[in-house]
Amino acid sequence: MAQKVDNDLRFFLWHQGSKLILCQPLSGTVAHALTEGILNTEVTASFPLFPTETPEVETSQYSMFDVFTSRIVPASFTPSEADLKLIKLANLRSLYLHRLEMILQKYVYRFCSPLEIEMHNYLSTLSLGGEFNITHPMVLEYSDILNISNVEGYNDLKMRFDSYGLLKIKAFALFEKFKRPLNECYTEQEAKATLEQTKYELYSAAAI
């Protein structure tokens, strides 16, 4: 059964055999993670701003993916017991994978403000282009405002850049590590235990 998400972009996990929509993950990260645990599934996304792609499932309990029109439509048949079990499983894993993603995002925000994250993204672009150096106008501006030397300004920005980079790597690595056991869970009890292990490993390690 499709759920409404407060976002223009909506993701759906569908089964290649039955074409049934198994769940509506709350992020693309979760959607693609689910395909690694439930065989013969694919991800599709819709943009409700475009009428031809708006799911027409509000009045239908179950929906399916029309491969010819690439639209989400009401199911043309009653799902079997096996289908219903797969839908339940997909929704369970989707919920806990999303919780895993939120725990890791919360961890990153514990150390970095949204403004610092935005700055890091900009520095990443400069670094990839080899432009981030002591003479870059941004470094000069930063140093001038804080009334410090260009060397100090560069070192401060670089330290923030490196620290946030490590945080992102840690969060990404833990998602990769724990999405597999979550994709092997069949009960809520198993999923909860896996999530608790994630929290333990995340916060018991030395803070970066």
Image (cartoon, grey):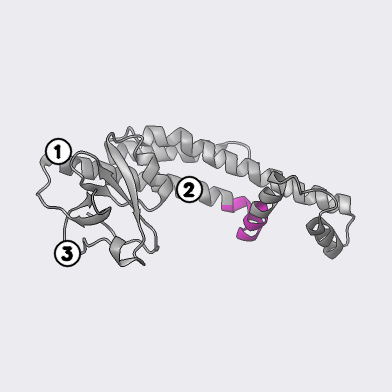
> How far, Cα to Cα, is label 2 from label 1?
32 Å
The residue singled out by tag 2 in the image is 103
3 vs 1, front mark = 3
Disc 2: CA contacts within 10 A as few (<14), some (14-19) or many (>=20): some
Q: Residue at x 63, y 37 (%)?
A: 206
> How far, Cα to Cα, is label 3 from label 1?
23 Å
| Among numbered discs 2 and 3, the one appearing first in the sequence | 3
Q: Quadrant of residue 119?
A: bottom right
The residue singled out by tag 1 in the image is 82
Where residue 205 appears, x then y in whole percent? 59, 36
Disc 3: CA contacts within 10 A as few (<14), some (14-19) or many (>=20): few
Where residue 73 appears, x then y in whole percent? 20, 57
State the extent of the magenta-drawn residues as a range: 109-120
Whether the residues at callouts 2 and 3 have beta carbons within 8 Å, the answer is no
Label 2 SS: helix
Q: Amino acid at mark 2?
A: Ile
Q: Quadrant of the C terminus?
A: top right
Where residue 110 appears, x then y in whole percent? 59, 52
Disc number placed over residue 59 in the picture, else none? 3
